Image: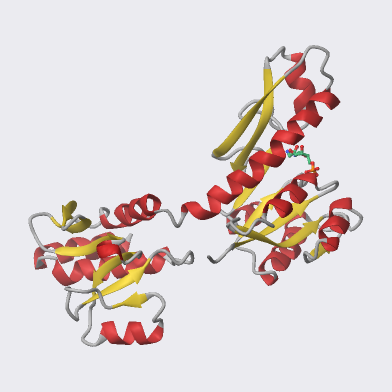
Amino acid sequence: MQRAKVGVLISGRGSNMAALLYAAKAESCPYEIVLVAANDPDAPGLALAAAEGIATFGQSHKGLKRAEFDRIIDAQLRAAGADYVALAGYMRLLSPEFVGAWENRMLNIHPSLLPKYKGLDTHQRAIDAGDSHAGCSVHIVTAELDDGPVLGQTPVAILPGDTADTLAARILIAEHQLYSRTLADFVTRERQPDWLLNKVREIALAMPQAEETLSHGMPCFGVAKGKKFGWFTRDHHGDGIIALLVKTSAPDEQATLIEADPARYYRPAYFGNDWVGIRLDLGDTDWDHIAIRLRASWRQIAPKKLLGLMDIAEEF
Ligand code: GAR
């Protein structure tokens, strides 16, 4: 199994980073930590990560513009080969450029049951409000602070006599468990057949007069009452593969693609030479490329009168 590469950003203690790091020691963990970076070279978490053999980077943000500092961090993450970013007590607002560059690839942990208590002082605010439970949330990072789709939450009971510190200490235990579990689910969701089918479906059904049917047990996409331009195959005849089959648009294209990238492209059994299989289960699918392939395939089978419609759609 190819592990997803995760860069972790911290500002201090780094106990959540440590929880992610130790969870990644399990052989079955679907991610690995490739870099721990901090906006403070003395952040204690950096020393711990280094002692565990993880690459680290620490630089103070002082004197640098926000976007300028974020560009430095971004370059470090990319040089380390990170596919995902996990914010773990990273107490810096991020520039829109940085957030945009890691869209749907960056998670954060926050010590409250979001959408309650964004920002700071979350534990005291939950106590003062008389809440029965506080807790923690892991969410996808978007431009708004502590916003973005929540992926997982753990409620933690508030005990009589709890102070912000006693409550924070208990929530931290929950954080350490929630974060690695949620990150593991997140990095593997793009390999789940249902997620992949939905993604293909979204692209295919946006084509003029496209419809989905089931044929030979496989979801397939065609022009209404016409021919098919895409098949979604999942463990067909027990081959263990999740792939999209599309029509090629030039003679010999099947052979050329297979030769260029034999791990990804293959000749689908029973489909002949003018179809090609593209594996979707390798963990690095380029969805813009899949969209191009599906559109080209649709063009192969669409009646002439519909081709004009596609030309108009593609202009937008
Ligand atoms: C954690 O409680 C985390 O949820 C919080 O900072 C702490 C960092 O501890 N994050 C935020 O408040 C972000 N808005 P750690 O450095 O030991 O992981």
5 versus 11 height, above or below: below
256 versus 206 height, above or below: below
Picture quadrant where residue 260 is located: bottom left
Q: Position of residue 58 (x, y in %)?
A: 84, 61
How has the structure been colored for display? secondary structure
Q: Quadrant of ligand 1?
A: top right
Q: Which quadrant does the C terminus fall into?
A: bottom left
286 or 173, nearer to the observer:
173
Q: Where is residue 80 in the image (x, y as percent from the top left)?
A: 69, 69
215 or 301, nearer to the observer:
215
Q: Is residue 194 left or right of residue 111?
A: left
Q: Residue at x 67, y 32 (%)?
A: 136
Q: State whether residue 41 appears in this view.
A: yes
237 versus 132 height, above or below: below
Q: Is residue 80 left or right of residue 51?
A: left
11 or 16, nearer to the observer:
16
Q: Is residue 286 left or right of residue 94?
A: left
Q: State whether residue 142 appears in this view.
A: no
Q: Is residue 118 left or right of residue 196?
A: right
